[in-house]
Image (tube, coloured by chain):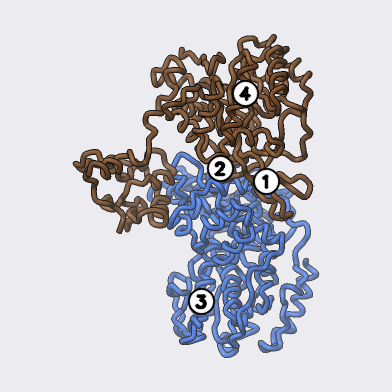
Amino acid sequence: MFSRLRSLAVTLSVLRSMRVPEITSWILSRMDLPLLAHRTESAFTDFKLPLMRGEAIAEATRCLFCADAPCIAACPTSIDIPQFIRKISTDNVHGSAKTIFESNILGMSCARVCPVEVLCVGACVYNQLEQPPIAIGKLQRYATDRAFAEGWEFFEAGADTGKRVALIGAGPASLAAAHELRRLGHACTIFEKRATVGGLNTTGVAPYKMKSDRALTEVEWILSIGGIEVKTGVTIGEQISLADLEREFDAVFVGVGLGSDSALGIAGESLAGVHGAVEWIERMKLEHLDLRAVQRVVVVGGGNTALDAARESLGLGIPNVTMLYRGQREVMSGYSHELDAAMSEGVRIEWQSVATSFGGGNRVERVECMRLDESKRPMEGGAFVLETDLVLMAIGQSKLHAMFATLPGIAFDRGSIRVNADGATGRRGWFAGGDCANGGKEVVYAAAEGKRAAHAMHAEMMGGHAHA
Amino acid sequence: MPDLRTNTGGIHSPNPFWLASAPPANSGLQIQRAFEAGWGGAVWKTLGIPIQNVSSRFGAHTIGGVRGAGFSNIELITDRSLDINLREITETKRLFPKHPIIVSLMVETESEWRDIIKRSIDAGADGLELNFGCPHGMCERGMGSAVGQEPTVNERITGWAVKHSSVPVLVKLTPNVSNIVPHGMAAQRGGAHGVSLINTIKSIIAVDIDRFVPEPRVGSMSTNGGYCGAAVKPIALHMVAALARERDFKLPISGIGGICNWRDAVEFILLGASTVQVCTEVMLRGYGVVEDMIDGLEQYMRTHDFSTIDQMVGKAVPACGEWGELDLNYETVAKIDASKCIGCQLCVAACHDGAHQCIHPVEGTRVPTVDESECVGCNLCQIVCPVEGCIELVQVDNGQARASWNEHMTEGKPIRPKKGAH
């Protein structure tokens, strides 16, 4: 991987001075995907096992086929869930997958990574009965995996409109937008600053839900509609100016996600062994980390990234995993089903506690902690120390809005790009979706927002002929 | 403790559960195991001149994931030698003297009937069942349902059998007729001591849609089979009730057709059967299913204060009538119990698309509402509702006196205004 990355870097340094049309494109189908065969994440198998055909049909047969089904309303992409499940029950898996992808082209990854417990499955009417809700995520995986395995193609590009759309960032939002734009006949170019496409689906998903190779397979599958150019290693605002972009394209979709991990700003934060959780997870997914010396991990934070980092550490064989969270369970932003899983797997949690400094020689060796009272003030005698070999900071990520701040009309809400219900910013031609606009939510929201923005872009570009 | 002993036409049984004449009653060792499991009696797989069977023989109708909800076979009568069968009958009777063995028979000429009846009785048969029902294969050779579909032939052959038999004779009727009553009456005129029904229904169970051949597939061909299993119960219940209701029909009935559990058995008994025969459920799950049948029936009898089966037999027959006798002024409406409703709205879809558009969604809640002024009380919502007791059909006191169609037409009794006929 690294030699591949180095050669890419050399290429990019040459490209840096070039204008848009000359940039060599790294179209994925031609890409020798820069993934190591043996990555740290390779140690994981799926925690939720796929359904076999018989299981899938039996489970699908349980579905009541509700009218105006609550599960559909609970899905950000509004997949017609009862319909796709009914098709599984009749062994019409092709039709089932088509129903899913019609609504959500990222249906394969969403089947694995969606927090279904708080979305579709949480809304299943069986929860009101003394019966388990339908395993919607697993059924969706059954249908979409089959589609991938069989190589079924459901979509083709629309008749060429002559319009061109730039999409910044190659994550789920841009991919969903680009695919929909292609169905509507618009040419698409995705600019990605990294060497790796797929965004957090590739670099951030807990590997017991989905590994990076699977995410890349999905990207390839989405791009197979044709006509989506992907330029990796291109940072908008550096190699290509915003002005150039605006001039060259009829519309721009911003799907840049979030920035780097936030820091606490306390002593010792620059010691070796103190990492941002998102950065560490990315390395764990794409690289081969040497964790032999790591016996203890402290994860700082109480969100889903913190829970992921803790469960992943434990799953990699690190015996002592402690989370440090300043609040109580009730206010924790991480999902309670993920917290329950983490605790049952053996993650320890220091509630109402904060890190005050990190100590150690060359590497971090300990975390100085302080317990807080109900009003978040340090408790008397509340100081304690956690010995550790690794610290993962999961207290949020920076917002990537600075690059767009120079564009009149684009406004921000607490660092997120402000968009209307269609994903339009205040600047004509500019749309946004995914984490950079919603502040950081699941893949399924990015997929929904990308698709929605595609239709709004289509309407704007085509003027009165939007629905022609 | 309820007494489960029964008497069907002089055949006494420790309980009403018999194996039907079919693969589960094909041999002595099978029937002995069945008796050990608790079966009260067995109708031995039809004896006659042994035949040659085909591969394959069975097909299944899968409904909503339930395999074998309907079932079909193209097997013929026994393919084992008469001598072996008779020897095993004797052996089984020796081991289980209190369990009746009814020998099913199918031959052609009177002398053949006389001979096989004598040998069956000599072997220990407690009763005979004349197979006038098989709708595949044997009927092409002038036997089985070919006999059962012709009342005169039925009566004549029944007469032969009764003449040559010293044990009770049951006639097994085919459902492949438009009206079962003349066929039951023919058996009665022939002197039978009881009837068993229904045999299987002429059918094509499925088509192999990749090979373009119906099932069960015998190489590149198939033929019609006999349909049975849970799915045929409603047809069987109707035919049993039709005979039980017939004033001039006096014979006891052994009920057959889709009986899978004690509840099914109770339904047959309430419509006039004094014993029930089971095949498909045993083929799918083995003899062990009888345990639930027995203790489920016992518990039912305790609940309803029945001490003998006879007290139950035909209890629901007086309630079987003609459509023209039904009270047109009896009115019900659906009531939804909001505390039980899970908000699936299956009733909304069913009522809107399949009934009379009187159940409507309500803004701000998942619990639908019933427009009682339009509700015809059809039951569809209650049928689709997955929650027991959530939707009830409640009688409305409309102040109208009972009036059937017949009474309306002949006596001019007033009937209530129509609902849902907009």
Res. A270 visible in picture: no
Q: Judging from the image, what secondary structure is the residue with disc 2 in?
A: helix
Q: Disc 4 on helix, strand or loop?
A: strand
**Residue A87 percent location from the top left of the image:** 58, 56
Q: Where B327 falls versus A165 (above or below)? A: above
Precedes in sequence: disc 1 or disc 3: 1
Q: Which quarter of the figure is the C terminus of chain B placed in?
A: bottom left
Residue at x 43% of width, y 14% of height: B307
How many other residues sit within 10 Å of disc 1, few (<14), some (14-19) or many (≥20)? some
Check disc 1 and give the amino acid type.
Ile
Q: Nearer the viewer, mark 4 or mark 2?
A: 4
Q: Picture quarter containing residue A227? A: bottom right
In the rendering, at what x and y percent does residue B15 appear?
54, 17
Circles 2 and 3 on the same subunit? yes
Tag 4: amino acid: Glu
Q: Nearer the viewer, residue B66 or B190?
A: B190
Which chain appears blue?
A: A
Q: Residues within 10 Å of mark 3 (few under 14, many from 20)?
A: some
| Marks 1 and 4 in Cβ contact (< 8 Å) | no
**Of the numbered discs in the image, which one, if any, rests on residue B129?**
4
The amino acid type, in three-letter code, at marker 2 is Met
Tell me if A30 is positioned left or right of A429 in this view: right
Give the distance between the C-alpha atoms of the residues marked 1 and 4, in whole angstroms.
74 Å
* Mark 3, residue position: A455
**Residues flagged by tags 1 and 4 on a common chain:** no
Per the model, the C-alpha gap separating discs 2 and 3 is: 43 Å
Tell which subunit mark 1 falls on. Answer: A
Q: Pointers 3 and 4 in contact (CB under 8 A)?
A: no
Disc number for residue A343: 2
Who's the residue at 48% across and 46% down the image? A351
Compare residues A124 and A213 and report the one nearer the observer: A124
